[in-house]
Image (tube, rainbow, N blue to C red):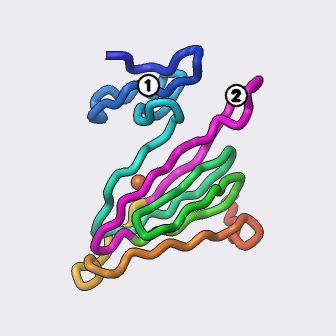
């Protein structure tokens, strides 16, 4: 199984997670031609995606879609269930397309696990930046 990207900028082949290799040229393994995570389900929690560099293309089963990055933040409530995709567009043809982000998963309390899915974008200008000495 091919587990690394190639010179054609194709994403590595799908795996089940056990093949994740943080030393590889790509830090994710899903997607056929565009790196990232094609449509996949979440349920019962919230994701907070905080971008540092690069861009993310989001689309979901609620009809939301958009591109965010470079400090933007996305807060998604999966609640009773949502299917979404997180792809990293290859916009630079002659230079690297670096994406740095982190995602926090917040477990919802039992009474809120079946909440309606929701999606909020917070653009960089409105994100409070915390720094620690
Ligand atoms: Fe996801």
Q: Residue at (49%, 32%) from the top-left corner?
A: 27
> Which quadrant of the frame does ligand 1 lie within?
bottom left
Q: Which residue is situated farthest in the bottom direction here? A: 111
Q: Which quadrant of the rendered structure holds the N terminus?
A: top left
Q: Is residue 61 above or below residue 120?
A: above
Give x and y (percent) for residue 5.
Answer: 50, 21
Please, what secondary structure does the residue beneath circle 2 have? loop
The residue stretch that appears in magenta = 78-104
Disc number at residue 12?
1
Q: Residue at (43%, 25%) from the top-left corner?
A: 12
Near mark 2 (Cα within 10 A), the count class, few <14, some 14-19 or many ≥20, is few
Please, what secondary structure does the residue beneath circle 1 have? loop
Position of residue 103 in the picture relative to residue 90 (left or right): left
Count how many numbered circles sit on residues in the image: 2
Give x and y (percent) for residue 19.
Answer: 32, 26
Q: Residue at (39%, 75%) from the top-left corner?
A: 117
Q: Residue at (71%, 52%) from the top-left corner?
A: 70
Q: Is residue 14 magenta?
A: no
Residue contact at pointers 1 and 2, CB within 8 angstroms: no
Q: Is residue 93 magenta?
A: yes
Give whichever of 48, 83 is nearer the camera.
83
Image-quadrant location for residue 90:
top right
Q: Is residue 114 above or below residue 16?
A: below
The alpha-carbon separation of the residues under discs 1 and 2 comes to 16 Å
Near mark 1 (Cα within 10 A), the count class, few <14, some 14-19 or many ≥20, is many
Image-quadrant location for residue 50:
bottom right
Q: Disc 2 marks which residue?
A: 96
Give x and y (percent) for residue 45.
Answer: 33, 68
Give whichever of 106, 3 is nearer the camera.
3
Position of residue 81 in the picture relative to residue 53 (left or right): left
Give x and y (percent) for residue 48.
Answer: 49, 63
């Amino acid at each position: 199984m091919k587990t690394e990207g190639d010179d054609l900028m194709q994403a590595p082949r799908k795996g089940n997670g056990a093949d994740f290799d943080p030393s590889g040229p790509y830090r994710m393994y899903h997607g056929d031609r565009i790196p990232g995570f094609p449509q996949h389900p979440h349920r019962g929690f919230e994701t907070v995606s905080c971008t540092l560099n690069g861009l993310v293309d989001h689309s979901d089963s609620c009809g939301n879609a958009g591109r965010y990055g470079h400090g933007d933040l996305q807060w998604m409530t999966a609640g009773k269930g949502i299917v979404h995709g997180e792809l990293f567009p290859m916009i630079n043809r002659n230079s690297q397309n670096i994406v740095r982000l982190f995602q926090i998963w917040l477990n919802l309390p039992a009474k809120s696990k079946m909440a309606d899915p929701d999606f909020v974008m917070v653009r960089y200008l409105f994100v409070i930046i915390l720094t620690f000495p």
